[in-house]
Amino acid sequence: LLLAAFVGKLAAQDEVQVLPEIKVKALDGKTVSTADFANDGKPIIISFWATWCKPCILELNTIHEEYSEWVEESGVKVIAISIDDARNAPKVAPFVEGRGWEYEVYIDENSDLKRAMNVNNVPHTFLLNANKEIVWNHNSYSPGDEEELRELVKQLAETGKIDAKE
């Protein structure tokens, strides 16, 4: 019985987590399903953030500075998911516009996507492959983390897989 439980646990560790199908709001207020997130088979970065989270803003600003180069190198798409609640949600669009972020930005007002992806604190960044499978994730942000992410994105774009430590 213990052996069966152990083997079951090992099998569970190998399970691939796919982006769950959850409804979020676009900045224009329209409801969008995460099932509609697409990038023509190229990598997708999902970044959970909030207007009140300084490390989140630093990470997204830093990626924004070189985003066009990232897209040119790998075709990657960044999708920023704000976890701001309904009270703060009206601040998100002006906040994003003020920074000139070229990402797709959505609001997870009810934290449904946040819960489904086991996001406990922000920033929390996920890298998805062509099948919307989560191949890497990272919690928190320190300057330089974006360089590791950039390398993983290039690797994923070139080979379809990554060789990551996490």
Image (cartoon, grey):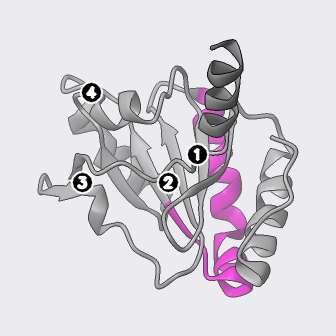
Quarter residue 125 falls in: top right
The reply to whether residue 125 is in sight is: yes
Q: How far apart are marks 3 and 2 (CA)?
A: 14 Å
Q: Which of 87 and 2 is in front in this view?
A: 2
Q: Disc 3 or 1, which lies upstream in sequence?
A: 1
| Residue picked out by circle 4 | 88
Q: Position of residue 113 (x, y in %)?
A: 34, 38
Q: Which residue is drawn at 71% across and 76% down?
A: 160
Q: Residue at x 45, y 32 (%)?
A: 50
In this rendering, which labeled residue sits more in front, label 3 or label 2? 3
**Residue 44 vertical placement versus 94 (above, below):** below
Prevailing SS of the magenta stretch: helix
Q: Which mark is on residue 86?
A: none
| Residue picked out by circle 1 | 15
Q: What element carries label 1?
A: loop
As drawn, is 107 to the left or to the right of 68? left
Quarter residue 104 falls in: bottom left
Tell me which segment is drawn in magenta: 54-78
Q: Is mark 4 on a helix, strand or loop?
A: loop
Residue 15 inside the magenta-drawn segment: no
| Residue picked out by circle 2 | 99
| Residue picked out by circle 3 | 27
Name the amino acid type tagged 3: Leu
Q: Position of residue 158 (x, y in %)?
A: 77, 83
Q: In which quarter of the image is the N terminus?
A: top right
**Residue 108 vertical placement versus 23 (above, below):** above
Q: Disc 2 or 1, which lies upstream in sequence?
A: 1
